[in-house]
Image (spheres, helix red, strand yellow):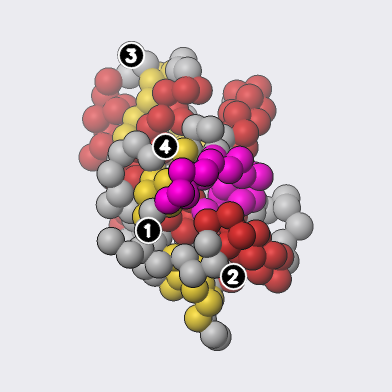
Amino acid sequence: MRLLLAEDDHDLVAILKKDLEIAGYAVDIADNGVDAEYLGNEMIYDVAVLDLGLPQRNGIEVLRNWRTAGNHLPVIVLTARNAWHERVDGFKAGADDYLGKPFHIEELLARITALLHRSSQQPGGELQASGVSLDEEQQTVTTEDGQTHKLTGIEFRLLRYFLLNAGHVLSKTRLTEHVYDFDSEKDSNVIEVYVRRLRQLIGKNRIETRRGQGYVFMDNK
């Protein structure tokens, strides 16, 4: 899953980026509102963490512009803990959730996970589909036979995206956009390699190839 972090506190960014990547997110950074608004409109992100006190263009204006343009990117706003009016303004502008500063990274991760599940109309807790269960905290997958496998970073991001979009055809380009950040070496052909590895772990019939279209994770409810 790919995340946009719009924050101008570089010390905080350094900490958050590392923790978010460990948690399985491809992270891109915007340190001002103009860049944040532009990147958010690229439609390559699954969620945005948006500080309201950005330079050049404040977070409220960025968020309002996104929503006016029909951009439904899930957004968690960051604000000073005692600035209740900013929280109200954020929700009015279209925020999905907020978190007051200072905060614990565990709470931010929990809120991101909950928002992604809600946006994909998935229940909370573990992601499950077609007998496959993904533990997002441990980054492991358990199959129908009860075997649990540890996933690499890319395998985890890819399987999580498949499960959050089960039943939908996903092109290799779309998968690449949502699994890698801007600093990563991108090659859509590598997606084939990771799909092959996931099939070895969870069963080859769970991820179907649609010739000329991409892949679909079969949600056999």
Q: Residue at x 44, y 28 (%)?
A: 108
**Quadrant in the picture for residue 79:** top left
Measure the alpha-carbon separation of dots 3 and 4: 22 Å
Mark in the foreground, 3 or 2? 2
Q: Residues within 10 Å of mark 2 (few under 14, many from 20)?
A: some
Q: Residue at x 29, y 28 (%)?
A: 87
| Badge number at residue 82 | 3
Measure the alpha-carbon separation of dots 2 and 1: 24 Å
Mark in the foreground, 3 or 4? 4
Q: Position of residue 198 (x, y in %)?
A: 59, 58
- Is there a contact, CB below 8 Å, between mark 4 and mark 1? no
Image side of residue 60 versus residue 39, left or right: left
Q: Residue at x 37, y 58 (%)?
A: 130
Q: Which residue is label 2 attached to?
A: 173
Give the residues in magenta.
140-159
Q: Amino acid at mark 4?
A: Ile
**Quadrant in the picture for residue 98:** top left
| Badge number at residue 130 | 1
Measure the alpha-carbon separation of dots 3 and 1: 45 Å
Q: Which residue is label 4 attached to?
A: 112
Confirm whether the magenta stretch covers residue 182: no
Secondary structure under tag 4 reads: helix
Mark in the foreground, 4 or 1? 1
**Quadrant in the picture for residue 22:** top right
